[in-house]
Image (cartoon, rainbow, N blue to C red):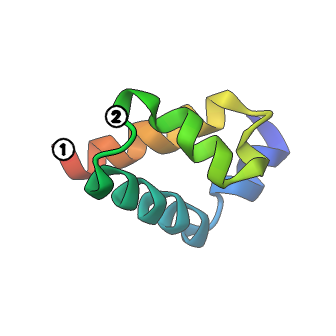
């Protein structure tokens, strides 16, 4: 995934921010978790052109909290 992937996910602070946003989304009940990728991309514009990165963040969050 290259350089951008390292910038976005190479530091725990980025994943913590993504996870915090996903926690808020989950707790609000709006929108559904099936829309989590789009919601994450709206909150973090740097993910808007990299859907794969947003999917990775959501999948990592789901793995951490739902396993």
Q: Which mark is residue 27?
A: none
First in sequence, mark 1 or 2: give its number: 2
Q: Secondary structure at mark 2?
A: loop
Residue at image point 65% right, 42% down: 41
Quadrant of the frame with the N terminus: top right
Question: In the figure, is residue 32 to the left or right of 49?
Answer: left
Quarter of image, res 52:
top right
Residue 43, above or below 49: below
Residue at image point 34% right, 34% down: 32
On the image, the x and y values in percent for residue 25 come to 39, 52
Where is mark 1, residue-wise? 66
On the image, the x and y values in percent for residue 3 come to 83, 46
Mark 1 and mark 2: Cα distance apart in space: 16 Å
> What crowding class fits label 2: few (fewer than 14 Cα within 10 Å), some (14-19), or many (20 or more)?
few
Question: Residue placed farthest to the left in the image?
Answer: 67
Residue at image point 41% right, 36% down: 59
Question: Residue placed farthest to the bottom in the image?
Answer: 13
Residue 3, above or below 50: below
Question: In the figure, is residue 49 to the left or right of 37?
Answer: right
Q: Indicate which label's residue lies in the foreground, 1 or 2.
A: 2
Foreground residue among 59 and 33: 33
Residue at image point 35% right, 59% down: 23
Where is mark 2, residue-wise? 32
On the image, the x and y values in percent for residue 17 come to 54, 66
Q: Secondary structure at mark 1?
A: helix
């Amino acid at each position: 995934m290259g350089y951008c992937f390292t910038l976005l996910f190479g530091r725990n602070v980025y994943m913590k921010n993504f996870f915090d946003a996903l926690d808020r989304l989950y707790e609000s009940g709006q929108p559904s978790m099936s829309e989590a990728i789009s919601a994450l991309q709206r909150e973090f514009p740097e993910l808007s052109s990299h859907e794969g990165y947003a999917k990775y963040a959501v999948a990592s969050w789901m793995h951490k909290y739902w396993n």
